[in-house]
Amino acid sequence: MHKDFSIGRWIVHPGLNAISSDSETTHLEPKVMQVLLRLASRHSQVVSKNTLISEVWPDTFVSDDALTRCISLLRREMGDDPHTPRYIQTIPKVGYRLIAEVRPIEIAEDEPKTSALLLETPVSLAPPLADSAESHETPDFISPPSELPNASVPKSAIARHSILWKLLAAIALLAGVSFASLLWGTHRQSSVAFRVIPLTSYAGQQDQAAFSPDGSRIAFVWTKTEDGSRNVFIKQIGSETLLRLTNGNEMDYSPAWSPDGSQIAFRAISEHGSGIFLVSSLGGQPQKVYTLLGPVQKEQAGLSWSPDGKRLIFADGFSENSPSSIYELSLDTMQAHAITAPPRVWDGDLNPVFSPDGRKIAFLRGIEGLVRDIYVVSASGGEPKQITRDERIIDSLAWTPDNASIIFSSDRGGKFALWKASARGGEPERLPVGDEDAYQPAISAATRRLLFTESSATWSIVGFPLSSNGRAGKPIAVVSSTQQDSAPSFAPDGSRFAFQSWRSGAQDLWIASRDGLNLLQLTSSGFALTGSPAFSPDGQQVAFDGRPDGHSHIFVVPAGGGSQQQLTFGNSNDILPRWSVDGQYLYFASNRNGGWQSWKVAVRGGQLQQVTTNGGYLAMESPDRQWVYYTKADAPGIWRVPIGGGPEVRILSQPRTGYWGYWSVTNRGIYLLDNEQAVPRIVLYDPVAGKITPVITLDQQPPPYSGISVSSNEDELLITDERNAGSHITLVEDFPR
């Protein structure tokens, strides 16, 4: 079944890796199309997961996650609902079944055919990519074939068409040009031959890999599932023997090799603070060489060694409330100085990397935490040059060995993928590898090797029934996907809730019925990031933060969909809206005066009013309108001030820093996450009696930031849940320079 055919209202074009309906055409990834073809060839039959995996990923070890992702993408593109399917039915613990009608498309013999109809078999446009594998202590390395099949036209297909040869040649030429353009547009180039190999596949998360100078070893960070430890390891490529370099309780990040390969520099965070350490690449006691000053996003803080081995560059903050800058540390004098100066209210500069010749430094500059672009500055100082202008999320970057280009990970095309940009600027191009959840590229100048991290997880909004006696019932995953469903917000009547998700290819807002069976995409603004939904007290509107110009601002949109109204403006960042009890105001966090403070604005417009002066982040009113409760961006706990103004008082030591979304003010008190204990739990705090009552015992730590929501009658609590999280390092051999 490799000619065009129909499934329900969709026309399937196997040769083009596309499906179409009316005037709408959607291109699918080759593996996604192959899954669809296997299901269609066995229409109405149950196809087991093992069968699909063995046929779509032959000679490659992948887990069920790769197949699950393909099914999810098919359902999303075809508008299918897994709970009430019209196309693909899940057979629990077995596999899948295509239930929609499948029909061939008959074309009159004398009707001209395009080259797409001549493609009897799907064309492999790139070597098989390494999908996220199941966790194993000893990975099974199976290299995909290094040569690609030729996309030839079968003779039998040509014989069936009585078309003049010249006309056929012209059509084929034009179609070939179009098809080549399509291949280039999707960046799956069949002329590139390389091997993609899973380099690590241990339990837990392996990330932030860096090549040794000779390209034979990698240093990486391994976060273990059993104890949450995050330490630096060295692995010889081609061997399963690991050397553990750090073994403490601190959290380690950003390992970087010295140019002679004798030392590893890394960042570490512990209860005693954070710093930069050096350790022998053969093992030994790490030595602290610098104490970091301000809080910086640890995964993107970065660390890079100059080619002459005399300097380290890294991101650091001048103070708690200042944006991060790029600093240079002399290893001779142990003195550091800032070499960049981002605008005061911006998030700052991150992830610096020396060019191979040491003359330039590439780094990320963020308008806001998740809106970043690439800049390049001379290693001797000067004004940075902006390279990209996407105002999207860029995760990490690396120089090519010729100093001419920068490889980076970004969501500029939807899913996080690897891209290449000239160091002089211009439109980036997508790489033919690392096109699904790919992060943290690294390139070996000595060998034709590329590294990147692939990650995956299942995200859910989980509901816990609550009873009047304070006990919680069995949790139920209300909505679930691999697309970061998070930040739930109940509607006042409890019939539905809003949440943020990447289901549409970008983070947007969705509305779900309470049982999760009915979903509505509420926003499709095209902003770099849209999130933090909050229902109004009357249930008619949803407030959120969006980023139309790179800076985040506060918006409201009708709960049934419609035009959005922007409430805040300017060159600062405004996030995390929450409604006042009477629905007249929105509280939000803003850095418009430098540090993060809580503010409020009238929904009908008017002057902004600052609520806190000593720091404020997520803020909510008490139901009796006597207090404003709030968290802070850089400190654990919950504070409150009288709604009419007055001194602040810290009333709780939880939630922890980074978990500022895990609390909710209700008539009974404040539900919040207590994760200071070995076993995290949700507790209820009574601010009048000062009493804390355990409500829910969780079986694992929830992800940072996201949060909880409690229904107005307090019969259910929603919480963000992340499961099966893992990241693994992938090696690309024979990568073109």
Image (cartoon, grey):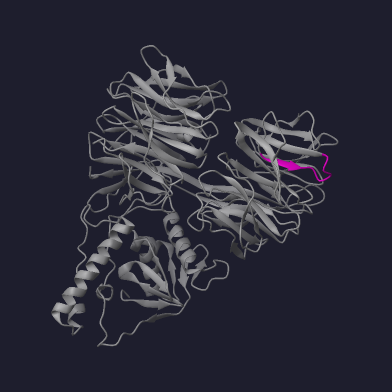
Q: Position of residue 230 (x, y in %)?
A: 48, 32
Magenta segment, prevailing SS (helix, strand or loop): loop
Residue at the top extreme of this rendering: 333
Q: Looking at the rendering, in which quadrant would you find the N terminus? A: bottom left
The verdict on residue 489 being magenta is: no
Residue 174 relative to residue 499: left or right: left
Residue lying at 79% horizontally and 33% vertically, measured from the top left: 645
Q: Give the range drawn in magenta.
A: 618-626
Q: Looking at the rendering, in which quadrant would you find the C terminus? A: top left
Instruction: Quadrant for residue 398, please give it.
Output: top left
The verdict on residue 619 being magenta is: yes
Residue lying at 35% horizontally and 20% vertically, measured from the top left: 311
Instruction: Quadrant for residue 64, please give it.
Output: bottom left
- Res. 397 in view: yes
Q: Position of residue 352 (x, y in %)?
A: 39, 31
- Res. 655 in view: no
How many numbered discs, if any?
0
Residue lying at 76% horizontally and 57% vertically, measured from the top left: 538
Above or below, 431 against 159 in this view is above
